[in-house]
Image (cartoon, coloured by chain):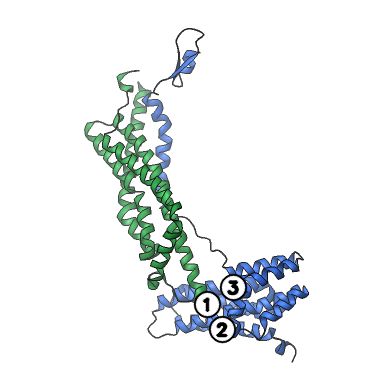
Chain colours: A blue, B green
Amino acid sequence: MARLIGGVGARLVGRVGATRFVLRPPTVVAVLAALAPVVLATTIAPAAAHHVGTYTPQDNAVSAGFKQVKFALEAGRADVALALFERGALRREMQAQAAALPPALEARTLAALRAGDAREVEGHLAVFFSALARDLALEAARQLGRPGVRPPDAAATGSKFLEAIWRYYNLIDFAVSTRDSKRSAAMRLALDDAETYARTAAAPDRLRASLGQIAQILTDVIEASTPSRRNP
Amino acid sequence: MTAGDAWRLPPRGVLLVAVVLIVLAEVGGASMARFKLPLARWARDAMLARPAVHGLVGVRDVDERILDEALVKFDAGLRLFHLHAEGMGLVILATTSVAATLAGAGGGRLLIALLTVGGAGYPLGYLLWSVLIPYRGIEGGKTIAEWVVWMPFGGAAIVALWWLAGLVALRMAGRWRA
């Protein structure tokens, strides 16, 4: 028994029956044997080259508000969707952007929510996010068109704008494609083109042209959804 | 227990360095929690004051995403400093004890110095990276931290750990042969 315990670094001491265990320091070789895998693992790990974590973009208040309203409508809880819209950042942003939106978009969205018309709400929100994405595309084209912008800077700036445009358009792509599949396909192709030009940095003019095309497609989506265009 | 089995303690200076590193890690961790908001505000203000460094374009929907990523990395740098300083403090204690026991007089001093300086310096790279993010951007700050701290100090620690691993292997092989 004593030999068995001693083998793992402890020994039985004192009189028989006085079961007292005294831990003694482990032998150097025993510790080294245990430490060797740790030393090896520690030295191999830095081969991963300073992994400093990954970043996952989060929703902003507006896109989070959109998702909350959408999921509440999908769950058949129009009352919850209405409450979320009335108190949320989505409505505040609609009010703030009213000048750039089709007339009374916020009022029509509110009316559709009160009526529990999910499809109508989805359409109005698609117009809203199309307008946000269109304004981003126009601003990107304007910034890229400024004199003295170097091609690498233009590509970097364009890429950031495209990311923001996609974040908004991605929310409404399904709604747009179910209403107008051609414009949805055209939008995806234009985004794809623009991303290609932003990656190469070789053709800032083409990148700018693609951004203009994106803005035009989104303008068409907005105009096609306004009551005057739908019911001439 | 034979004389060959006796453990030798590393020099007091090494123990002090390891303990100070662990204390810094704890103070850093506590400060991160206590001053989370002021730190984030300071970093955000410093980034907004340098739009060109961070590629800010003056549009909220674009800039917020850039600032958010930089703030997340700023926080990650502080967390990694806390984590690595705690861990490397213990690594210094363990490895220098082994080195003091195994290596001879001349080689032992150099090995212990490499383990101590490399192990204590390496975590400071994360702190440096965090501090540099608002001024030089995520990648710019990382490049500086890599060249100034991570590569020299981390390299020293890696060399020393391999050296120690070799010594351990030699000692074990000798024991088995005997």
Image disc number at residue A89: none
Q: On what subunit does the disc labeled 2 rest?
A: A
Between marks 3 and 2 in the image, the one whose residue lies nearer the viewer: 3
Callout 3 touching callout 1 (CB < 8 Å): no
Between marks 3 and 1 in the image, the one whose residue lies nearer the viewer: 3
- Amino acid on which the number 1 mark rests in the picture: Ala
Assess disc 1: are there few (<14), some (14-19) or many (≥20) residues with their C-alpha within 10 Å of its C-alpha: many
Q: On what subunit does the disc labeled 3 rest?
A: A
Question: Which residue is rendered at x = 57% and y = 78% of the image?
Answer: A133
Callout 3 touching callout 2 (CB < 8 Å): no
Residue matched to label 1: A194
Q: Quick check: do tags 1 and 2 share a chain?
A: yes
Q: Residue pushed farthest bottom? A: A232
Question: Which residue is rendered at x = 47% and y = 55% of the image?
Answer: A53
Q: Position of residue A22 (x, y in %)?
A: 44, 18
Q: Whole-Å distance between the Cαs marked 3 and 1?
A: 16 Å
Q: Position of residue B61 (x, y in %)?
A: 52, 73
Q: Position of residue B142 (x, y in %)?
A: 37, 59
Question: Which residue is rendered at x = 67% and y = 84% of the image?
Answer: A104
> Closer to the camera, B90 or A40?
B90
Whichever of labels 1 and 2 marks the residue nearer the N terminus, that label is 1
Image disc number at residue A213: 2
